[in-house]
Each structure stands twice: as C-alpha cells, then as structure tokens.
Amino acid sequence: MSIEIQGVTKVFGDFKALDQIDLTVPSGELVALLGPSGSGKTTLLRVIAGLESADDGSILFDGEDATTRHVRERGVGFVFQHYALFRHMSVFENVAFGLRVRPRRLRPSREEIRERVMKLLKLVQLEHLGKRYPGQLSGGQRQRVALARALAVEPKVLLLDEPFGALDARVRQELRSWLRRLHDEIHVTSVFVTHDQEEALEVADRVVVMSGGRIEQIGTPEEVFHHPANEFVMHFLGNVNVFHGRVEGGKAVFGDVAVEHGEAGTATRSSEVEPLDDEAKPAKVFIRPHEWDIAVYRNGRPAMEAVVIHVNAAGPVVKVSLLSESGEPVHAELPLEHYRSLELRTGQRVFLSPRKVKVFFD
Amino acid sequence: MVRGKRHRVLPGFGLTCGYTLTYLGLVVLIPLATLFLRTSSLTWAQFWTTVTSERALFAYKLTIGASFLAALVNSVFGLIVAWVLVRYRFPGRAILDALVDLPFALPTAVAGISLCALYAPGGWLGGMLQKAGVQAAYAPLGVVIAMVFVSLPFVVRTVQPVLADLDQEVEEASASLGARRWQTLRRVVFPSVLPSLLTGLALAFGRSLGEFGSIVFISGNMPGRTEIASLLILTRLEEFDYAGATAIAVVMLGMSFGMIFVINVLQTWSRRGAV
C-alpha cells in the first residue's frame, strides 16, 4: 500500500514538530526517516500510524483519505523503540494478541491462530521461545517478538520507530541486515525512523533526511550521500571538513588551494552553484575525510600543508588528524596499505590534495 | 590462593546487624512471645472454649467479613482514584493526592468521631440513609464504613506507582493491533495492575483487621452484633481475664501472620515474568 503525506503540520505548544511535510512512499518500498533528535521524524511516523493527529494536512493510504481514521482501523503495524511488549503474556500470546482481540466473526479459529503465530515465530527465528516471557529474552529477541506481533495482523504498512536504537552495536548490525532480508521476503511498505545515518544508508531503498520539522532531501542512499542537497545533509551524512573559502573563475578556493569543484548544477535548496561566474563569491567548501590524497612531498597538485597530530590505525581505514598551516583541524581517512607505504609519523609535514570538493554558497 | 578480606565502601555489617536483631527482638519478638506465654497459662481445653465461644466466633466473623468487604470496596474505588491521580492533570490534583494520605495521618479516634457524627441517625448522611431504610451507625455497616475509611490509602498507594510505571506505548501497541478500548483495559492494563491491586487489597484487609480506634465510636459495640475482635480483647481485659484476652489475641496474631504470608506470596507471584 502506498502512503501519501500532504502538507502535514503538527505543533506541540510553541514547538513546530512538523512543518508542511509532503512525502510519498510507493507501495512495497522500505523508507528511512533520518534526522537528529527533535527533527520531527518520530512525530511524522506517529502521525502516519494515527497515534498522533495532524493539525493540518492529510494522510492518504492507497489514495484513500485516512487522516481521521483511528489507529486500530488503519491497518498499520507499529514497532516501538522499547518494544512495548505485554510483559504478563508469553511470547506466543504477545504475537497472538492482534488476532485474539478481533471481533468474533473475523477471529481465526484457535488452530489457525496457533498456526499463524508459529509461522511468524519461525520467521523471526524464535519458534522455540514461544512459552517464555518478555522479561526472559534479550533485547534483540524482544524486538523480534515485537516485529512478529506487528506482522501478525497482516498490516498493509509497517512502521518502525528507532527499532534498533536500544540494542548494542553487534546485535544492531545483525538485525539491520536481517530486517533488509525480511523486507525483501514479505515486501510490505515500511517506514522506519533512525538517527543513525549508517543504518539508514545500509537498509533503506530511499532515505528522507529531516531537520527542524522539515524534509531536507529525499533520495536513494547513494544520492543523498554523494549528492547532498544542502549543508545540513552534507553534515549529517558522515564526517566532513569545512573550509570558508570562495568560488572564483569556476574554481573552489580555500587557503592556498584552488580546485575544480565539479558537480556543477546540483540543485540545492539553500543555494545554486554557478560555475561560470567569474566574480569571486564567498562559499563553504566541503571535503569528506576519504576524499583527500596525502603526499609526503609536493607533487605539483594544488595542496594544503598540514602537520600530522594523531593517527588511529585500528581498522581497515586509517584515521589521521592533522592541523593545517592556518591552524584549522583537518580529518583525513586512507586505506591501511596506503598509510603503511606513506610511513606517516606524528609531527610530520604533509600535503593534502582534495580529489573532490562540494561547494555551498553562504 | 587465599583472597584478602573483601573491602566494602561502607563497612559495619556486625554493628548494624547486631542492632537490627536487638531492635526487632525488643520491639517485635519479646512482646509477641509474652502473648504466647500469657496464653499458655490456660489449658488446651480452656483455650479452645475461650477462642470458640459464640461471642468470640461472632467477633471474628464480623471482623474478617467487614475487613474483606472494606478491602473489596477499596480495591474498586481505590483503583479508580489511583487511575485518575496518575493519568490526568487537573487543577487541585495535588490536593486530592494529599487527601488520600489523610486516613494515614489522622488519629483514628478523630476519624471515628467524625464518621459517627456523620452517619449517626441524627447526622447528615445517617439521616438520609435512615430515610432509605438503611442503618449505618451502630450497625455492621458502620464497621465497614470505618474500615473503608482507614484502609483506602493502602490500595491507592500500592497501585499508584505501578500505574505510573505503566508504559503508555504498551496501550498504543494494543490499539495499533486492533484492540478496542475495553479490550486494552481488560487484557493489557488490568493484568499489569492486578498483582499490585491484590497486594493493596491484602494490605487494606490487614489494616482493617487491626482497626480499633475509629470503629469503637461508630459501631456501638454490641456483643453478637457489632463487636469486633479487638474490642472483645479489651472487654476481656476490663474483666481482668488476661489469659482470655491473650487467647483471642493469639488468634488475631495468627490471622495477621497469615495475611503477611499471603502478601508475600502475591508479591512473588506479581514478579513472575517481569523484567
């Protein structure tokens, strides 16, 4: 089922949680709402679910207006960050709940309920734990029970609120790829909320970046990562070095470095890049840590001088902290092999050349 | 390998435990032992006749029956009071909340006098009940009323924190799964509150069993009609029948002990399956 959100606004007191949100989620897609806390992503999810009512605007399910429909009639499955399992019920009863509360004429028979619950428990790989109580399960298991419980009523839309937020890093990683596989299996339209950009980029078909109650950018993980629409998205999706510079004669200039900034014509909400303007315009120059080339000697490429301050070589990617000549901290990342061949030492003077820069005008 | 003595941040187990044992011995165990000692001056046969006399049997029946009724009434209305105090924000809520504790703090004699004045046939409520053909004061109903008054805080204060801790997301989850309001209440909220409600009921029951001060004013203390067990003990004492008084006291002690046991069982049960 597709979801259409049209001009949805939600205000809590003086706080505008959602400001004229327009968003369409095509049927069968897995969409991530990504943003920092307070960006409105959870509120938007709750408005879609009907747990919160919009002050303005409408929600359409498959083109049908569902704005005033009660949560129990929307046919959504909702998975909460802290699971919200029924503690006094066994895992089996938790999953069976949605079927048991149906009016008698719609309620499946005992055997059917049993069969369906067992099938779902198998789907979430918990078929042997049906008799346990939620208190006896680990966090990851509880979240899988919550998911099975939500799926039991065969929702047309699955909504997940920071589903892995309360789990530790390893379990989170596992469940993440598991959720992706599960979605590929059952293809139910899903929206999940996260503040973890890595999670959003890894799991979702499309990412909706939000801040301050508004949508900053909608796109595939690749699009939002490589072609951020504005400074906010650039900052939010991974680390980035920022330099205050200018654009002059089609080149991005910061410090002593002048480089082609490429990617001309990328439309941004806050500004537009105009490469053929000869006049110098102040701009911010963004360079991702992995977009630096580090050289020990000057090699003719435009480069900024910097001194190595700290090296973290634990992992396949080596993180190098540097200080530029003008005293700005610079972060760079390079493959381990490359780092070894360079033989970098703390205190060493090196030359940094950007392979790719992104420019946003002030 | 021998490990060194474990070091704690706050030492003093010997001192505090010694104090605890002495204190509990002095305050609880020795007085109770005296009770049994006094009773033991009776033979078994004498003991049995004393504690199973018609008057005594009636007193137990009234005490237990009224206590149970009071506890039941409070578990219904106490739950509603607790629900309102936890779930809604309205002007005067803090005052209402404080009001619940009043029966704790009020000297029971004060409660007794005011209840008596209110429910006596000449009193404001008593007069209205009289017209409806119901006698409150100087009748078993009066005993129940006094017990309801003194035991109300026990239910409210036991249920309140549990209600406050109830995750509202659980109710939202229930609704999103298609449950109607009463289904959410019956299947999700009520089972979560039930253990604490039972504990509150047991506490209210125990409190009512032991209530004396407020009841003597409103009940009229008629043997075989409105005389509660505690009052019977007092009557026996006034007759200088110490052994008889303690014999009945021993029976009461047994009941109180039974209550504590029940409370503990309920609390263990309420923690099953909990996180």
Image (cartoon, helix red, strand yellow):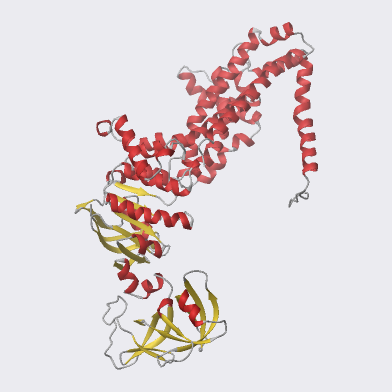
Q: Where is residue A175 in the image (x, y as percent from the top left)?
A: 40, 53
Compare residues B58 and B163 and report the one nearer the observer: B163
Q: Can residue B122 be seen in this view?
A: no
> Which of the 4 image quarters holds residue A354?
bottom left
Q: Where is residue B57 in the image (x, y as percent from the top left)?
A: 62, 11
Q: Where is residue A281 in the image (x, y as percent from the top left)?
A: 34, 89
Compare residues A211 and B62 and report the one nearer the observer: A211
Q: Where is residue A233 in the image (x, y as percent from the top left)?
A: 36, 71
Relative height, residue B112 to residue B96 (above, below): above
Compare residues A17 and A310 and report the one nearer the observer: A310
Relative height, residue A198 to residue A107 (above, below): below
Compare residues B192 and A197 and report the one nearer the observer: A197
Q: Can residue B84 be seen in this view?
A: yes
Q: Is residue A109 left or right of residue A95?
A: left
> Which of the 4 image quarters holds residue B241?
top right
How many badges with numbers are in the image? 0
Q: Is residue B65 left or right of residue B44?
A: left
Q: In this view, does A276 lie to the left or right of B78?
A: left
